[in-house]
Amino acid sequence: MPEASTGSATANPPRSLAEALRARDDVALAALLHARPDLLNPVPGDVTQLATRAGTRASVVRALDRLDRFALQTAEALAVAPDPCPYPVLESLLTGGEDEAARAALPRALGTLRDQALVWGDEERLRLVRTARELLAPSAQRPSPTGLGPTVAEATAGMSPTRIQEIVAAAGLPATHDPVSAVTALTGLFTDPERMSALLDEAPAEAHQVLERLVWGPPYGEVTPNPTPPVRWLRDRGLLLPATARTVVLPREVALHLRGGLAHRRTAPLAPEVGAHREHRPQLVDANAAGQALAALGTVEELVKSWEHAGPLVLRAGGLAVRDLKRAASTLDTTEASAAFWVELAYAAGLLAGDGEADERYAPTPAFDDWCELPPAERWSALASAWLPATRTAGLVGEQDAKGRTLSALGPDLDRSAAPEVRHRVLDLLADLPEGGSPDPDALLDRLAWERPVRGTSDLRARLAHWTLTEAEVLGVTGRGALSAFGRALLRRLDPAPLLSPLLPEPVDHVLLQADLTAVAPGPLRRPLGDTLAVLADVESKGGATVYRFTPGSVRRALDAGHTAVDLHAFLTEHSRTPVPQPLAYLIDDVARRHGHLRVGAASSYVRCDDDAVLGEILADKRSAGLGLRRLAPTVLAAQAEPGALLEGLRAMGYAPAAESRTGDVLVARADAHRTPARSAPVPVPDGPPVPDATLLGAAVRAIRAGDLAATAVRREPAPSGGGDVPAPGELPRTSSAETLATVQAAALTGSAVWIGYVNAEGAASQRVIAPVRVEGGFVTGYDHTADEVRTYALHRITGVAELAEDQV
C-alpha cells in the first residue's frame, strides 16, 4: 500500500466513525475542527457527539462542497464501490490500472477525506460516511456524476421471482431456489470479466451500439412496448433491467465492465496550471493600475456628490429604483452595470446611506467628508479595503431572485457569502504569477472550478470570479490583467498607500481658461479649487486632463451657493494660468446682473420684482400657465406652485430667480447642505461559522477529550449496601444528597477524581470529571477536567456522583 495513505490496516480497526475520531491525536482532531468549523457550534460534549454531528446532512453537504475535484471524484467512487471498500478496489475504480497520475494523487485525496471525517476505516475496509454515500450514490431522481446506475440487486428489487429466474436462465446460469441467490448469481456473472466477455461476444452488433450510448451515462433509456430485437436481447439477459414501465437501466456492474472498471470517464488528479498568458513590465502594470485608481476616486466622488442635494428615494422594499440607477449611469457616463458597482462600492465604504427620514433618500454620510480630506492614496486604500471583504455583489443587479423579483442596487438581497473567498482566491492566483504576468481568464476559471467543483446547477462561483477580474481592473487593483504592487500589498493586509502614492500625480492649484468657455485642469485639483470649480462649471470630459464648461446654469448655481460676481472674477484670476477670456467675464456679469432680479418665496409661493414690466412678461408667457400665477400687486405675483417648482419653472423660461427667506434675505444653497446621520458601513455576511483560532481549537479539543473521559470512564462498583444505582455507560449517575456529599468529601480528602452528573441554572444536563479540593457552604470546588480549569458547583444541582476506577484517575 502507498506510504502516503493514512489509516493503514491494524489489528483492531475502528468499528465506527466515533472510534476512528477517538483514535486521532489532538493535532488531527484540531485539524478536523479547523476544516469544518460548523462542528464547533456548540462545542461537542464528547467524541460521540462530534461523530454524530459530523455525519449530519447539512455538515456533510458543506464539507463536500469544499472538496477539490479529485477528492470529490474519490468520494463519488467510494459511493458506488462495495461498502466497505478495499484500497485496491478504490484505486482500480479511479485509475483502471493505467492512470499513473491518478494513482499518485489518490493517497492525498483519500487523506483529505479522512482529515475531514468523510472517510474512516483502515485500507482493507474504507467506509464513506453514510450521509455522504446517500448524497453521492446514483438514483433515478439524483443521477451520479459518475454516470453509473443502480446495482443489479437495487434494480431487481420488487421484480417478480419468476422474471428473475427467466433472466438467469437466458444468461446461461443454472436456476436457483430463491430470488436472492438468483440475483447473487447474476451479479457474479456481471463481475466476472471472462464470463462477461463471453456473454457479450454473443450479443448482436446493434446491441453493442445500445450499450455504448448508455455506458458513460445517463444509464437510463426509453423503450417502446415492443422493443427492437437488440434491446430485447439485452433485456432478456439482464444487461438492461426495467426501471419503469417505459424505461430501462444499465446495471452498475455491466457498465463497470464495459468501462474497464473506471468510475469516471475522465479523472482530474492534478490542478490545472495557471501560467502567465502575457507578460508586461511591472512598472507599466503599476502605472496603468494607478491611472485606474485615480479614475475610480473621481468616479466615486462624482457619484456621491451628485446625491448631496436631492438624492434618490429609497424603495419601500429597500434599494435603488431602476430609473435612479439609469440616472446615476448617465451622470457617470457609464453603463448601468458599472454604475451599480460604483454605487455598491461607495455604500460598502460607508460613504453613502439612507438618511432615515420619513421619505427616506440616499445621501452622503459624514464619513464622506472625512474621506474627501484624505490623501488620494489613502482614499483609494479605503475603497479597496471595503471591496475585498464585501459580500454584497453588484453583478447580480438586474437579475431576478427565486421569487421572480428584480434585484436592485443597494437592495437587501445582494449578499453572497462566497464573494470574499472567491475574490481572495482570484487575487492569490494572480499573486502566484511573476510580477507583470497576467493569466488567461479561461485557465484561471478552470483552476477555480477544479478547486471547488459545482455539484449542483449554480455557476455563482464562476460568475463571481469573472466579476472579480473586471472589478479589480476598473478599481486599479490590477493593471492590464496583472496584479499591481499595491494590489499585492492589499492582498497581504499591508497598507497599499505608500506604494500607490508615488504613482499618483500631485494635485495642481491652477486651471487653463480657454476662449470657448472651458477650463482645462491638467491634473487632479486641490480640494478647495476642485470643490469651487465643480459648482461654477460642469464637467465636459474626464481623463488625464479634465475639461470643465461654463454655462449660464452653472454660473447661476455658483451665485445660488452664495458667491458674488466679484468673488467669481477674483477666483478665476487667482487660479488660472491664462488670462480670463472676455466671453467668460461677460457671461458671469450677465448672469449676475439678472440673478436675484426676481425673488421667489412661500405664500403658497410668490414672485416679486421691482420691475413690474418683467412680471407682466411672465404673465403673458404661455409657458407660465402651469404655475398658476396671478398679480397681487404691481411688483408681486402669487403662484399655486410650490417654491421649488416655481424656481425651476422660471429658470426653464430663461429667468434667473433667487429663493428668499421669510425675512426677505436670499437663501444660499450650500454644497454640503444634506448629510445622513452617522452611519457605519454594512457588515459582510459570513460564509458559515468563522474559522476558529488556535486558542479556541485547543480549548475545544480539551473539552471533547474531557467529555469523552467522563462518558467512557470506568467507575467503581458501589458497595452492596450503597443506595446508588449503577448507571449504564454514558448515563448520568443518580445518588442521594447524603451520598453525594459523602463521596465528594472523601474525594477531597484523598485527592481523587469523581464523575458527576450536573444540571445548571438553565436546566442543561452534563457529565463532568472533577477533582474536589474543597467542600463547604453547599458548594464543591475542584479542578474540572472537562473545562480544564478550577470551578465551583452547587451541591444541590449534582444529580449523582460515582468514583472512578484507579486506572482512570
Image (tube, rainbow, N blue to C red):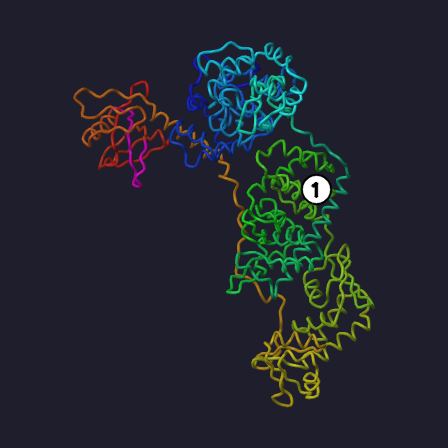
Please report the residue visible at 36 percent of the width from the left and 32 percent of the height from the top: 789
Of residues 64 and 562, the one nearer the viewer is: 64
Task: Please name the residue that numbered disc 1 is placed on.
Answer: 484
Q: Quadrant of the N terminus?
A: top right
Label 1: element kind: loop
Of residues 265 and 601, the one nearer the viewer is: 265
Q: Percent from the top left, x then y, of residue 95?
A: 62, 18
Q: Quadrant of the C terminus?
A: top left
Which span is picked out in magenta?
Answer: 750-766
Q: Which image quadrant is residue 89 in?
A: top right
Residue 611 on the magenta span: no
Neighbourhood count class around disc 1 (C-alpha, 10 Å): few under 14, some 14–19, many 20 upward? many
Q: Percent from the top left, x then y, of residue 598?
A: 66, 81
Of residues 668 and 178, the one nearer the viewer is: 178
694 sits left or right of 765 in the view: right
Q: Is residue 391 above or below residue 598?
A: above
778 sits left or right of 114 in the view: left
155 sits left or right of 531 in the view: left
